[in-house]
Image (spheres, rainbow, N blue to C red):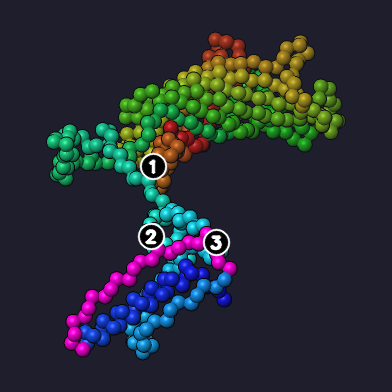
Amino acid sequence: MATSTTEALPVTINTFATAGFVLAFATNAAGQPPAPPEASPEVPPEVPSEVPSEAPSEAQPSTVAPAEISAAAPPPAVPESPVSSTNGDAPPPASTEDSVDFATDADPQDPVRFTESEAERDPVEFSSPTAEQLPEGIDFSTAGGKAPMLDAAEVTVAPVAPFTGTPQRFAIEVKFGPYLPSVDADYPGPGLGAYADVFGKTNSRGVAVGQPRDRLMTQLGFEWQFVNVGGPLSIGTSIGFFQARAQALLVQTQPADPTVRSDADRVRFSVMPFTLLLGYRFELLADRFKVPLVPYARGGLAYGIWWAGNGDGDVSVNDAGVKGRGGSAGWQVNLGMMLRLDFLEPSAAKALDSATGINHTYIMGEWQFSRMDGFGSLMNKVSVGDDTWYLGLAIEI
C-alpha cells in the first residue's frame, strides 16, 4: 500500500531522536559526560498540490542497533497530520461550544474548552415583613444600615381570648299543640252549638252527640331581641294554621234515613291566627351558672282569620248569599319554659355557634291564653281563640 510523504516524515524524525537519546544514555553510563543532543531540524510538512501517483521512497533505516532501540522507552504517539492524502484542504477547527470527541477530533494546536451543561438557576428572592406583620411596641427603624436585633423579652404575645359565642339577636321557633276554636263558647241555647253540630262527635247516623275533639295547630314564630337585661327583651310575631273536617249535613232528612250526612260532600273550617307579641326570656342563670332552664313570657295582640269551605275548596255561601269567612281580633298571652340543650354537648354547641351562628338550641313547652273574639261584647265576632298548650323547638341566632 502506498504511503504519502507527509505521513512518513514525522516517523523518520522521531526515529532519529530516539536513537540519539539511547546513545547519550549509554555514554553517561560509562562515566563520560553526555554530549548535548543535536537538535533535529524541524522540517515543516510540505503539502503537495497534487498527490503523487507513485509511492514515495522508503525512509532511511536508523543506524541504532535494534537492541538499543528496544531498550529505550516507546516513543510518544504522534497525532495524525490533519492533511489528507486525497484532499489538500485542511478541515475547519472544531467549535468550542460543541462536544469534543478526543479519539478523532482533538487538535494539539487548539485548546479544549468546557461549557456548563446545567442551566443557571433563578435567584431566590426574600421579601421583608410588612408593618402590620411586625410586633407592636418595638422600634424597627434601621441604624447604620443594619436591622435591629429583637430581644425575646421585649416581644409580647397577646393571650388568645376564649370563644364566647357570636352575637345573639334573633330567635326562631316551631311548635305544635291541640286546638279547638271557641266558636260555641257563647252559645246560649240548648244542645250543641253550630260548630259542634257539624264537627262534633257523632253516632251511627251522623248526628252530633258531643263536643268536637281537638285538632292539630301548627305555629311558626320569629322574634327580634333588641336589648338584654338578664335576658333578651324582644318583639316577635307568629303565624299558625288549624283545620277541622267533617261530612256535610244533608239539608232535608227524615227520622227513618240511615244517615244525616252526605257521602259526596265534605266541609272544612280553617283558622289562621297572627300575633304581635312583646316577650322576655330570663337567661341569666343559663348564661352564668349553666342552669339549662330558661323561663319566658309573651303577650300582645292577636288576629284570627277564619273561613268555611266545601269539598271542592270553595268558600261556603249560605241561603242569604253571605260567604262563610271573616276575622276576629283579640289578645294573647304565652307562658313557657325552655330547656337549653347546650349542656348535652358543650363542645358541639360551641362548634355549631362558630360555624353557623346558632347560639343556643331549645326544647320548649308553653301554655297559651288566646281570646280572638272581637274583644268580648264590644264587637259581634266569631270567637276562634283557645286556651291550650304547645311543645316545640327553638333556636337563638
Q: CA distance from mark 1 to mark 3?
A: 103 Å
What is the span of residues highlighted in magenta in the rendered image?
A: 30-53
- The residue sitting at 37% across, 84% down in the picture is 63
Q: Is residue 165 left or right of residue 49?
A: left
Q: Amino acid at mark 3?
A: Glu
Residue under label 3:
50
- The residue sitting at 55% across, 18% down in the picture is 303
Judge whether 118 appears above or below 194 on screen: below
Front residue of this view, candidates 24 and 318: 24
Whichever of callouts 1 and 2 sits on the residue coming sooner in the sequence is 2
Does the rendering let one see residue 36? yes
Q: Main secondary structure of the magenta part?
A: loop
Q: Are marks 2 and 3 in contact (CB under 8 Å)?
A: no
Residue under label 2:
109
Q: Quadrant of residue 292?
A: top left
Q: Amino acid at mark 2?
A: Gln
- The residue sitting at 48% across, 55% down in the picture is 92
Q: Are marks 1 and 2 in contact (CB under 8 Å)?
A: no
Residue under label 1:
350
- Give x and y (percent) for residue 168: 39, 30
Indicate yes or no whether the magenta region holds residue 376: no
Front residue of this view, candidates 105 and 127: 105
